[in-house]
Image (cartoon, helix red, strand yellow):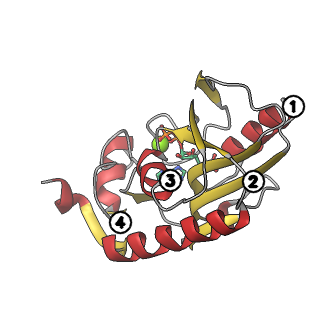
Amino acid sequence: MMKDDIERILISQAELERRVAELGAQISADYAGKEPILVSVLRGSYIFMADLTRHIDTFCRVDFMAVSSYGSGTVSSGQVNIIKDLSDSIEGRDVIVVEDILDSGNTLHYLFQLLKARHPASIRLATLLDKPSRRTKPITADYVGFEVPDEFVVGYGLDFDERYRNLPYIGILKPSVYKDKLGLE
Ligand SMILES: O=P(O)(O)OC[C@H]1O[C@H](OP(=O)(O)OP(=O)(O)O)[C@H](O)[C@@H]1O
Ligand code: HPA
Ligand SMILES: [Mg+2]
């Protein structure tokens, strides 16, 4: 079974629900009277995006961008591939980029450069998880759900080799799972 691959639960479903509601309330207060565009960075952010937007009570728009830099490993390849670009222009608009995790910072560093060049009125970052110990690029988030330790986490949108996104909590994989996959032991 899928959950047999999980060593332990790091953030429970109830904790996720509570914190995402708080972030939504904070964003609602900060953007009162505005109409931000929330940009979901697919695929990892799809669940956070869906839950977060339902806790925002100002007008807002949603758009989606698909990027990938991890392939099937647990370390960033350093190369960010744009798989799908935004549908609408962000020029002159207030943008909130919605991410599942800020790890090395490669993905967001690249994405922020790309999006800033399109001249939004403002651009901020909301990330569910922040793993600051692994950062190699200078980027910080404006809204952070939880800080996580230097371990590979899965669930609530986050995958390892495209699995585990559908777990309703954030968990830590048993090392044997990714070592088997990578042929390390
Ligand atoms: O800070 P970084 O080291 O760049 O890592 C964070 C990024 O890596 C993951 O995406 P991934 O490339 O695995 O694509 P996915 O969202 O489809 O899983 C995650 O969803 C973030 O977008
Ligand atoms: O810890 C992680 N888990 C899943 N995907 C990720 N992408 C960057 N870091 C992670
Ligand atoms: Mg991934």
Distance Cα–Cα, label 3 vs label 2: 15 Å
Residue 41 or 22: which is nearer the viewer? 22
Distance Cα–Cα, label 4 vs label 2: 27 Å
> Pointer 4: what residue?
171
- Nearer to us of marks 4 and 2 is 2
* Numbered circle sitting on residue 53: 3
Distance Cα–Cα, label 3 vs label 1: 25 Å
| Residue 60, above or below 152 | above
Compare marks 1 and 2 and give the one earlier in the sequence. Answer: 1
Q: Is mark 1 within 8 Å of ligand 1?
A: no
Compare marks 3 and 2 and give the one earlier in the sequence. Answer: 3
> Pointer 1: what residue?
117
Q: Residue furthest front?
A: 33
Compare marks 4 and 2 and give the one earlier in the sequence. Answer: 2
Residue 174 or 37: which is nearer the viewer? 37
| Residue 149, above or below 83 | below
Picture coordinates of residue 84, whole percent (x, y): 57, 22
**Residue depicted at 87% across the width and 31% down the height:** 117
Q: Quadrant of residue 107?
A: top right
Q: Secondary structure at mark 4?
A: strand
* Left or right: 164, with 117 as reference point: left
| Residue 19, above or below 76 | below
* Numbered circle sitting on residue 124: 2
Q: Amino acid at mark 2?
A: Arg
Q: Quadrant of residue 128?
A: bottom right
Picture coordinates of residue 79, whole percent (x, y): 67, 32
Q: Residues within 10 Å of mark 2 (few under 14, many from 20)?
A: some
Q: Secondary structure at mark 3?
A: helix
Distance Cα–Cα, label 1 vs label 4: 36 Å
Q: Amino acid at mark 3?
A: Thr
